[in-house]
Image: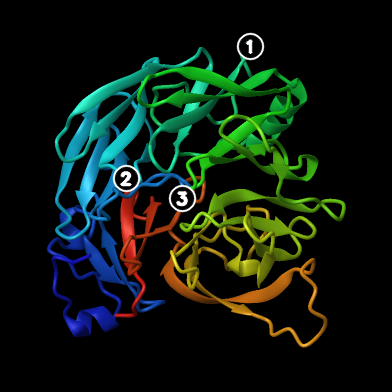
Amino acid sequence: MRVWFSVICGLATAGLLVAQNSSNTGIPPKTWIDPDTGHRIVRLTDEPGSASLYFNQNGYTADGKNLIYTTPSGISVLDLETHATKAVVTGAVRVIVTGRRSQNVYYLKGDAVFSTDVNTGITREIAKVPARSSVVTVNADETLMAGTYTERDAPAVNVTAPGQPQQLIQAQNKGQMMEERLAARIPMGMFTIDVKTGEVKTIHKSTDWLNHLEFSPTDPTLLMFCHEGPWHKVDRIWTMRADGTHITQIHTRTMSMEIFGHEFWAPDGKTIWYDLQTPRGEVFWLAGYNVETKERTWYHLQRDEWSIHFNVTKDGKLFCGDGGDPGQVARAKDGEWIYLFRPELIPNRGIEDKNFVNPGVLRSERLVNMKKHNYSLEPNVSFTPDEKWVVFRSNMLGPTYVFAVEIARS
């Protein structure tokens, strides 16, 4: 990803803003060197209120050249090399994901789901969606979509109706709303949509709160989902086949107040990673479960290194995290950073047992000082396809914009 600007070394080392626009113009800076970390930060978007996608939503086109982001006017695309942008979809829409094989972005608009090719602009209505439903994921070969519906109205939990823009700011009473939603035990269904024919098929029904659906990035028939609610009250992480069979629980609690969630797929589709705390707010792990070998790997983190969301590179050699303020579950005193993590497994000098967890630690490096960021907006980090930058959204300059920080130190 090429930056348009040259950096004047004296200004950079002093931590001053180095951009085409100066701070006294009222225009937010385009690029600077973080004085606390030495890493270059670039503001990718110009529209106030623009945002990158949720951490587990694929926001990069299949050719690795473009980033999809949302604006108050709809959906736009950014060229990762030139940083040129253009609007792709206008109006009140809700992004699902970008395709892993095509240049399509998938989204909800009104009562239907659509796809638009970001290069040609060709748009297609795929299907009408059921009442009180949301479609949230597209499979690896873009033949199926999946979502959930409720059989009656449910208490709102910081969500928006189908076809409406994503809600970026977390509600202050989210915990109470989640308790109320879990207790309601509202009958739900999980369904798929055939992308070619538009056929809608219910594959699972439950009074558990079903949420956080995400197809494997490599296996078109493997779907991850969660039982949503306060994490200490639910067995959260599950997988199933796209026909509703082979429902499998991924993690089983072994102590009171153990919590786990914010699960996401590794790009190779082999490992599910998730935040694990044993117990809640005290001991912190980034835990992984290999769906092929059944192996478990737990990487330990310090309290200040805990992050709301994590992500991982294709080869699994680097992780990133978006940190958290003192009001989050970790109660970190100095956790407001974008982090880079290098995993290290602890050598096994004992008994080989395939049932044992493979323990390790994450060695952290701070990339961005987020002290000026209001964490009611979650940054939601992701690696660019070339794995040279970490993309995140932030309100550190006032309005929300999309930023990228260079992994290599400037």
> Tag 1: residue type?
Arg
Front residue of 124 and 47 = 124
Few, some or many residues within 10 Å of mark 2 (<14, 14–19, 20+): few
Q: Is residue 112 visible?
A: no
Would you say 266 lies left or right of 64 here?
right
Would you say 354 lies left or right of 390 here?
right
Few, some or many residues within 10 Å of mark 3 (<14, 14–19, 20+): some
| C-alpha span from label 1 to label 2 | 36 Å
Give whichever of discs 1 and 3 has the lower sequence position.
1
Front residue of 24 and 141 = 141
> Tag 2: residue type?
Arg
Q: Quadrant of the N terminus?
A: bottom left
In the rendered image, which quarter is residue 181 located in?
top right
* Residue 307: % across, % down: 57, 60
Q: Tell which residue pokes out farthest to the bottom in this image.
A: 349
Residue 334 is labelled as: none
Front residue of 75 and 26 = 75
| C-alpha span from label 1 to label 3 | 34 Å
What residue lies at 71% left-to-right and 43% top-to-bottom? 248
Q: Is residue 315 visible?
A: yes
Give whichever of discs 1 and 2 has the lower sequence position.
2
* Residue 14: % across, % down: 28, 81
Q: Is residue 207 above or below residue 335?
A: above
Give whichever of discs 2 and 3 has the lower sequence position.
2
Label 1 sits on residue:
152
> Tag 3: residue type?
Thr
Label 3 sits on residue:
218
Label 2 sits on residue:
101
What residue lies at 70% left-to-right and 57% top-to-bottom? 276
What residue lies at 68% left-to-right and 29% top-to-bottom? 209
As helix, strand or loop, the secondary structure at mark 1 comes to loop
